[in-house]
Amino acid sequence: MEWIWIDTCCIDKASSAELSEAINSMFAWYRDAQVCIVYLADVPTLGDPDPRAPDSPFRRSRWFTRGWTLQELVAPDPHMVFLSREWVPIGRRAKLADVIEEITKVDAKLLTTQYTPAALEELETSVARRMSWAASRQTTRAEDRAYSLMGLFDIHMPILYGEGGAKAFTRLQMEIIRRSPDHTIFAWGPHALLPGPMRNLASASPGGDVHSFPLLARSPTAFRDSGDLHAVSTDALTARFNLPPIAFPEYHETNHGVRIQLPIFMLPWSHYMPLFCAVLACYRRGAGSDDPDACADTELIGLVLRKMTSDTAYARTEAQLYMHGAANMGYTTKLHTLVLRESCDIEDVHASVQDIYIQL
């Protein structure tokens, strides 16, 4: 073997050009390497060497909590090897896939193959699911929570330390939107079930205030509860509501927000300030049929919106909806072109924004 590259000492961080090149290239370097070795300095060989043992040093390794190591885990060949503190082999990724899935939530099937677009499609690994893998991981610099995910989505973009974590993560999501039709990127935040009895809604009383929130998440943490979401085709979505197919199912960024065409209906409980539900082309994993295009009997995801100054401009809200039950809602639904506002004055809102499951 002629060359070896170690991320902790082979990048001249004093050179912004070299740092940017390394961050944009390292996923490919891991993927194309003849062999990748993971040295776990906090996992001793002595004691209980079985990595599958409950509370084993392998399970507790800090390596599984760092933001940058997510791409180091999924990018290489499945035969990448883990070494203990004493440089003793613990095992290969493919052989340890089951326990690594328990630790990281990354699909074991994906860990036993090469990380490729074909593999992601076969395993129906949505954008939200990949984001959820990083929800609990930490980085020293706030921006690195976004930069460390670029390779997972095949994104290349400028590295701008100092812009802040929220802006870096928003830039990453906008780049993903330009390349992928996957609506799960909008399905972040905690969820409640619709229909059912309304327990709490800010606009349910005169003078109640409904705040606007950004369309896109401000950190991967917002996707903590979105790992079980699948994308569906827009044809399947519109067919479920007996609506005509969307001729050009695309969405794009404008100077006012993201322009997108979605089924939409008015929420009947929002008496003092009209609120609307825009239904996304995605559903919750494990609900209904395994066929990703079978929308009947599945829980689709909707965003609670409030109308802005024009007929097409809407903003995401903080409306807290707690819904239960399962029945065909029968609401009057239409296909509408929306401009969903992205800008917002609130920086960290991942714990407040509420999606709703729509039981169909």
Image: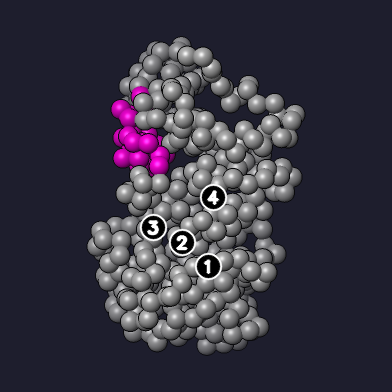
Q: Nearer the viewer, mark 3 or mark 1?
A: 1
At horizontal 64% and vertical 35% (from top left) the residue drawn is 21
Q: Circle 4 sits on which residue?
A: 220
Q: Quadrant of residue 94?
A: top left
Mark 3 vs mark 4, CA separation in Å: 15 Å
At horizontal 57% and vertical 61% (from top left) the residue drawn is 216
Up-down: is 143 above or below 16?
A: below
Q: Nearer the viewer, residue 143 or 113?
A: 113
- Amino acid carrying mark 4 in the image: Pro
Binning the other alpha carbons within 10 Å of mark 4 as few (below 14), some (14 to 19) or many (20 upward) gives: many
At horizontal 46% and vertical 75% (from top left) the residue drawn is 262
Q: Quadrant of residue 231?
A: bottom left
- Amino acid carrying mark 1 in the image: Tyr
- Amino acid carrying mark 2 in the image: Pro
Q: Circle 2 sits on which residue?
A: 181
Element at label 3:
strand
Q: Magenta span has 268?
A: no
- Which of the two discs, 1 and 4, labels the residue nearer the N terminus? 4
- Amino acid carrying mark 3 in the image: Leu
- Which of the two discs, 3 and 4, labels the residue nearer the N terminus? 4
Q: Nearer the viewer, mark 3 or mark 2?
A: 2
- Which of the two discs, 3 and 1, labels the residue nearer the N terminus? 3
Residue 203 locus on image (x, y percent): 56, 80
Q: Contact, CB < 8 Å: mark 2 with mark 1? A: yes
Q: Nearer the viewer, residue 22 or 341?
A: 22
Q: Nearer the viewer, mark 4 or mark 2?
A: 2
Residue 69 locus on image (x, y percent): 51, 33
Q: Magenta span has 100?
A: yes
Q: Circle 1 sits on which residue?
A: 251
- Which of the two discs, 4 and 2, labels the residue nearer the N terminus? 2
Element at label 2:
loop
Residue 279 locus on image (x, y percent): 43, 73
